[in-house]
């Protein structure tokens, strides 16, 4: 058949893999046009890469990997599936940094977005919009940062780590310490080009095809593949003042976090926080912030207390504000109740600060500690229950069981910075503030990973039992339709309707396990 003939020419080694010839039969050969077939890859390396992700929790093998050059290639692929007698599943793979197989497509086709070259990163200006950039959905945020910085500009909202694709983070939300001020990344998108599950190429914004626009933002890849996003830019600072303060008491720590995020123009540009415990020391992969002396001082406090909390804030500055920045910082930190003598300050370029995790990644990679299992649990928690969560989960489970290393993040976000029309799910209690908690475990052995997976499930069950109405960010522990309905709450019916409208044959992002229950 057509696919086999062409692939023999392109990949003469294909016959060496049994899985290749077996899985090939699951694609509807008769419907694949030549332009599609020449861009399908079945070699072992392509298939293996597309069968795994950053989480290393499990594998799902696709039939083929598709390497598009243009959005039209993706349109053709999706149309081929949509019109086939038995449609095949398709998953866009941005950078494969999900942890739960979300970018996998068992027996289907994984689209390797990295080969797309159409939009690139274009910085533009218009009278009505000001500065913005048009970026391909496949672009990594690090490249968006580098390119926009050449113009003295940058997006306003980030993730902690920048080697993630624009399409991948916009399908979730994209949060970090700037989100309390600017909202998640999905709050600064002006327009997108999207290829739906029917293979329609649609440009959408708040005023044009708004139903698709809102659906796709935070939509877990269910309604379309983002090939271009238009993102708001602002003048970029050149440097940052970076501060960490240590707290022994959770109530004071959260009170100060909440105070800082209420300061608006006079406040910080970034606020996060994390736990320091015996196995999760002061310096971890998020950044070697502390000097050796300061690190041992903080770690010994953590050993004495069992658990301490580090509040992290950043204030941006440039040549114009250089003279006043220290005064501003002093003013901001006045009245904060961190432990006496436990405030640590550092200065960095804006680029180095935003790209801080990469430095640690390279160190961990050299020690073989990056490419390990990542049984992560990310949650949104109502402010009114954050003390209960601290006691029952952070102290009684994480601290006591003390099972793995990895940063455990906790910081507040502001509800009104999230557009309720998007598909993104945050905590349902209508309080102004909610918290995000990221239990970013890393384990070398499968056994340890399984224990953490059980611990994560125990945490979810406990929250349910004691009525802490948490929501999973990057949801991956749901097995039934009822669980997904509960997750989406009031947004479920709109979500389901959009699926029927934009991807009626359930082709897209099967790895989310959302409409394809096992
Ligand atoms: P992939 O894993 O490739 O895909 C994720 C999902 O999006 C899949 O369902 C996929 O099909 C879909 N998808 C991918 N591309 C597209 C597209 N163009 N159009 C439509 N759907 C698409 N997240 C935060 O919010 N804040 C953080 O600070 C943060 N830090 C992280 C740090 C590390 C080290 C890692 C590994 C992850 C972090 N994340 C963070 C999580 C990250 O944002 C998500 O896992 C994101 O999905 C990863 O992007 P990706 O390009 O690798 O997506």
Image (tube, rainbow, N blue to C red):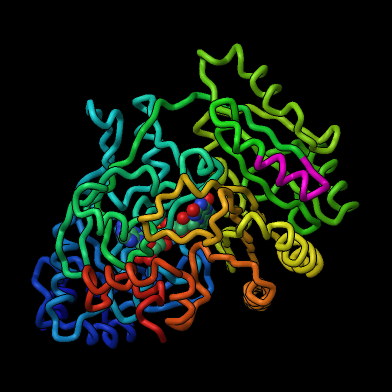
Check residue 367 for magenta coloring: no
The residue segment tinted magenta is 246-258
Quarter of the image where ligand 1 sits: bottom left
Residue 274 to residue 328: above or below: below
Q: Position of residue 365 (x, y in %)?
A: 57, 54
Q: Quadrant of residue 239?
A: top right
Residue 25 to residue 89: above or below: below
Residue extending furthest toward the right: 304
Left or right: 493, with 430 as reference point: left
The structure residue drawn at horizontal position 68% and vertical position 33%, both measured from the top left corner, is 243
Q: Which secondary structure dominates the residues rendered in magenta?
A: helix
Inspect this view and state whether residue 132 appears: yes
The structure residue drawn at horizontal position 39% and vertical position 58%, both measured from the top left corner, is 218
Inspect this view and state whether residue 47 appears: no
The structure residue drawn at horizontal position 31% and vertical position 64%, both measured from the top left corner, is 92
Residue 36 to residue 289: above or below: below
Q: Position of residue 238 (x, y in %)?
A: 49, 24
Which of the image's four quarters has the N terminus?
bottom left
Which of the image's four quarters has the C terminus?
bottom left
Left or right: 90, with 463 as reference point: left
338 or 386, nearer to the observer: 386
Residue extending furthest toward the front: 430
Q: Position of residue 496 (x, y in %)?
A: 32, 73
Q: Position of residue 358 (x, y in %)?
A: 53, 45
The structure residue drawn at horizontal position 26% and vertical position 36%, both measured from the top left corner, is 122
């Amino acid at each position: 058949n057509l696919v086999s003939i062409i692939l023999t020419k392109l990949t003469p080694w294909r016959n060496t893999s049994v899985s290749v010839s077996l899985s090939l039969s699951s694609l509807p050969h008769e419907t694949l046009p030549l332009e599609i077939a020449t861009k399908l890859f079945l070699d072992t390396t392509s298939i293996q890469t597309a069968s795994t992700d950053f989480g290393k929790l499990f594998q799902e093998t696709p039939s083929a990997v598709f390497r598009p050059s243009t959005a039209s290639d993706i349109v053709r692929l999706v149309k081929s599936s949509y019109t086939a007698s038995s449609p095949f599943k398709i998953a866009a793979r941005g950078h494969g940094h999900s942890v739960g197989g979300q970018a996998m497509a068992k027996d289907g086709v994984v689209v390797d977005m990295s080969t797309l070259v159409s939009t690139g990163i274009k910085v533009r200006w218009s009278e009505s919009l000001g500065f913005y950039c048009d970026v391909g959905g496949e672009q990594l945020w690090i490249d968006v940062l580098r390119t926009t910085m050449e113009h003295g500009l940058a997006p306003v909202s980030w993730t902690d780590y920048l080697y993630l694709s624009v399409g991948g983070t916009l399908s979730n939300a994209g949060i970090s310490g700037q989100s309390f001020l600017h909202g998640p990344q999905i709050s600064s998108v002006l327009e997108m080009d999207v290829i739906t599950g029917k293979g329609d190429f649609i440009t959408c914004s708040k005023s044009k095809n708004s139903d698709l626009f809102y659906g796709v933002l935070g939509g877990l890849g269910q309604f379309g593949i983002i090939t271009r996003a238009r993102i708001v830019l602002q003048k970029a600072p050149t440097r940052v003042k970076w501060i960490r303060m240590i707290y022994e008491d959770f109530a004071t720590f959260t009170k100060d976090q909440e105070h800082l995020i209420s300061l608006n123009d006079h406040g910080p540009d970034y606020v996060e926080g994390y736990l320091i415990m015996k196995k999760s020391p002061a310096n971890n992969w998020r950044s070697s912030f502390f000097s050796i002396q300061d690190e041992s001082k903080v770690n010994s406090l953590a050993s004495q207390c069992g658990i301490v909390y580090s509040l992290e804030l950043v204030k941006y500055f440039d040549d114009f504000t250089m003279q006043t920045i220290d005064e501003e910082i002093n003013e901001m930190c006045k009245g904060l109740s961190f432990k006496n003598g436990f405030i640590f300050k550092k200065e960095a370029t804006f680029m180095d600060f935003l790209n801080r995790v990469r430095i640690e990644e390279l160190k961990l990679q050299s020690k073989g500690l990056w490419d390990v299992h990542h049984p992560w649990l990310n949650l949104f928690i109502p402010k009114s229950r954050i003390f209960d969560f601290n006691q029952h989960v952070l102290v009684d489970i994480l601290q006591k069981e003390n099972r793995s290393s990895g940063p455990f993040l906790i910081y507040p976000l502001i509800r009104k910075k999230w557009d309720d029309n998007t598909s993104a799910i945050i905590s349902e209690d209508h309080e102004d503030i909610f918290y995000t908690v990221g239990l970013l475990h890393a384990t070398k052995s499968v056994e340890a990973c399984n224990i953490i997976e059980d611990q994560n499930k125990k945490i979810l069950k406990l929250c349910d039992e004691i009525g802490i109405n948490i929501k999973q960010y990057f949801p991956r522990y749901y097995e039934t339709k009822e669980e997904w309905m509960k997750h989406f709450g009031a947004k479920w019916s709109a979500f389901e309707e959009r699926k029927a409208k934009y991807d009626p044959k359930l082709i897209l992002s099967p790895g989310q396990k959302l409409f394809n229950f096992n």
